Image (tube, rainbow, N blue to C red):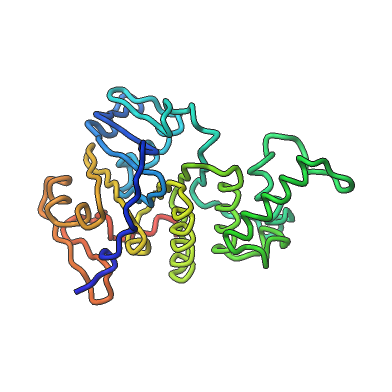
């Protein structure tokens, strides 16, 4: 029977991984979060980072951007040491809530991805060539994510799914080679989850490597190239069918786990309360 795991993205010839860890260990507050981690993410690959709360998913993202140094092993990001390639990385933190009264427009939010370090917003009137190029780039990414119809509206007055598209546009506006997304589907309804997952897959088709932190793998299974699963201080990485399976998860958790496939292709994990296809709403 064909499931949503049976449609891998076509293979790509990649000279060097976008992210590569070898024998990596991370410590936070003197505690080992994970160790002996070997994994790689190729250019243009859509990779999910899964695992229970406290397993070190956010620590991995922070290590990639140089905020948490490794205590052992090596980490290379876009051919450089962590932090050295941050200008080539787009980052979307965990979804925030915007005040409905916030008047900043979606297009202004995207523009902050280009010049958010500067004070104020561009003044109206005659614009320099650089300003015109920046405006064209903002329009380009807004069109890419399909946010044109509502980009002029105040950000607090568009839906959660529309906000997420605008935030992804903000992360893309600098033309990153690596996009880091921390639970971008959290709190979205199923149609918006599917739409955002499809959008991210299209971004990968343009050669951008995407690492998406998720708590529930099911909404993105049909789009993934690779899974990184963190648990019990270790990691398993590989194709979704090789990681989200009973033998791999049983070894990772050191307890018997069974993975069942429903008639509609969703995965149900039996044997651990926070396994990769078990959704737990952490944001009531």
Does 190 sit left or right of 232 as displayed? right
Q: Residue at x 29, y 33 (%)?
A: 33
Does 99 sit left or right of 53 as displayed? right
**Residue 118 appears at what percent x and percent y?**
72, 35
Depth check: 90 or 52 in front?
90
Q: Quadrant of the N terminus?
A: bottom left
Mark count: 0
**Residue 2 appears at what percent x and percent y?**
23, 72
Most extreme residue toward the bottom is: 263
Q: Which residue is drawn at 48% across and 64% down?
A: 188
**Residue 207 appears at what percent x and percent y?**
45, 49
Q: Which residue is drawn at 40% across and 40% down?
A: 58
Dividing the picture into quarters, in which one does residue 112 lie? top right
Depth check: 169 or 266 in front?
169
**Residue 265 appears at what percent x and percent y?**
27, 71
Depth check: 202 or 161 in front?
202
Q: Quadrant of the C terminus?
A: bottom left
Dividing the picture into quarters, in which one does residue 283 lie? bottom left
């Amino acid at each position: 029977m064909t499931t949503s795991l049976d449609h891998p993205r076509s293979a790509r010839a990649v000279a060097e991984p976008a992210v590569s860890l070898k024998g990596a260990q991370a410590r936070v507050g003197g505690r080992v979060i994970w160790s002996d981690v070997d994994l790689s993410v190729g250019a243009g690959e859509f990779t999910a980072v899964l695992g229970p709360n406290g397993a070190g998913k956010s620590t991995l993202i922070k290590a990639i951007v140089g905020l948490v140094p490794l205590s052992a092993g090596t980490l290379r990001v876009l051919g450089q040491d962590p932090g050295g390639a941050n200008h080539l990385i787009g980052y979307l933190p965990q979804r925030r809530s915007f005040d409905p009264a916030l008047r900043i427009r979606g297009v202004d939010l995207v523009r902050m991805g280009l010049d958010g370090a500067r004070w104020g917003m561009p003044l109206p009137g005659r614009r320099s060539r650089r300003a015109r190029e920046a405006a064209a780039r903002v329009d380009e990414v807004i069109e890419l994510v399909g946010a044109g119809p509502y980009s002029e509206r105040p950000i607090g007055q568009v839906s959660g799914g529309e906000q997420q598209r605008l935030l992804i546009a903000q992360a893309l506006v600098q033309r990153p080679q690596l996009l880091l997304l921390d639970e971008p589907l959290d709190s979205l309804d199923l149609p918006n989850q599917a739409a955002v997952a499809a959008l991210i897959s299209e971004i990968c088709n343009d050669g951008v490597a995407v690492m998406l932190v998720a708590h529930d793998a099911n909404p993105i299974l049909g789009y993934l190239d690779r899974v990184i699963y963190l648990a019990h201080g270790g990691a398993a990485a590989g194709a979704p069918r090789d990681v989200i399976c009973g033998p791999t998860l049983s070894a990772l958790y050191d307890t018997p786990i069974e993975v069942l496939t429903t008639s509609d292709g969703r995965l149900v994990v039996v044997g651990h309360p926070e396994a990769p296809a078990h959704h737990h709403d952490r944001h009531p």
